[in-house]
Amino acid sequence: MARQPRGSRRPPAVPASAGGRGTSAGAAGRERPPIELWFEFASTYSYLAVWRAEALVRAAGLQLRWRPFLLGPIFQTQGWNDSPFNIYPVKGRYMWRDMERLCRAAGMPFRRPTQFPRSGLLAARVALLGAAEIWCPEFVRRVYQVNFAEDRDIADEAVIVALLDSMGLDGREICALSRSSENKDRLRQQTDAAMHLGIFGAPTFLVGGELFWGNDRLEHAVAWALRGAGPSAAAAE
């Protein structure tokens, strides 16, 4: 396993008894929908979300599904050719200071990257390829740490290969498979699906047909799923 940078802390532990696939059943027998975590590797606040989401969701007895996508095409439909944090400097200055505070409070390592945003295309293809594999959550968290704690280029294939190798996987083979035409098409389709769902930023949590945008909406998404995310949940709001 790769050595963690100084001052880092592991994400919250995931209960060993939790997990599985499909929906969860509540006390009254109502099916509880899974929580889909839609994330983009260039997204700062997604770093916070992926750090804590798995433990929180599974501790609630729910299922978490990983949904990598690309924000670039979505931003382009809004007339942006860059991150809004770069387009609007005042907003960007606030975001970086906010990230420092939030990461410090969570005990997470953080270093402002010297390049922002970095391309998460390769990492997204790999995450999509392994979305149903047991190694996906750890891979996702490590990519974010490489970008936002170690200030290394996640667009560099050598960085991704080394990361996968450190997890006991065949990094070169996985990266090669991620570049297949089929997998590239799947990522394009997943990004199109995000636009169709109305997703405009990351992280976004999807519970049934309900969207929750932002790291600070994770608890709201969990509460919605626990109520069954049906008509009765909407009435309770």
Image (spheres, rainbow, N blue to C red):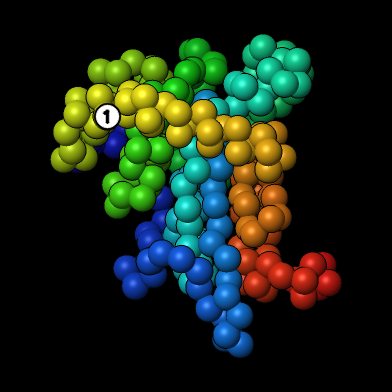
The secondary element bearing badge 1 is classed as helix
Quick one: quadrant of the N terminus? top left
| Residue at 16% over, 40% down | 168
Question: With 205 as the anchor, is 166 left or right in this view?
Answer: left
Crowd class of label 1 (few under 14; some 14 to 19; many from 20; radius 10 Å): some
According to the picture, the residue beneath numbered tag 1 turns out to be: 177
Residue toward you, 111 or 235:
235
Residue toward you, 78 or 149:
78
| Residue at 75% over, 15% down | 79
- Image coordinates for residue 204, horizontal then vertical, percent: 63, 44
Is residue 149 visible from the viewing direction of this image? no
User: From what the image shows, is residue 89 above or below residue 50?
Assistant: above
| Residue at 54% over, 62% down | 34
Question: With 56 as the anchor, is 92 left or right in this view?
Answer: right
- Image coordinates for residue 116, horizontal then vertical, percent: 54, 16
The amino acid pointed to by label 1 is Leu
- Image coordinates for residue 18, horizontal then vertical, percent: 39, 69
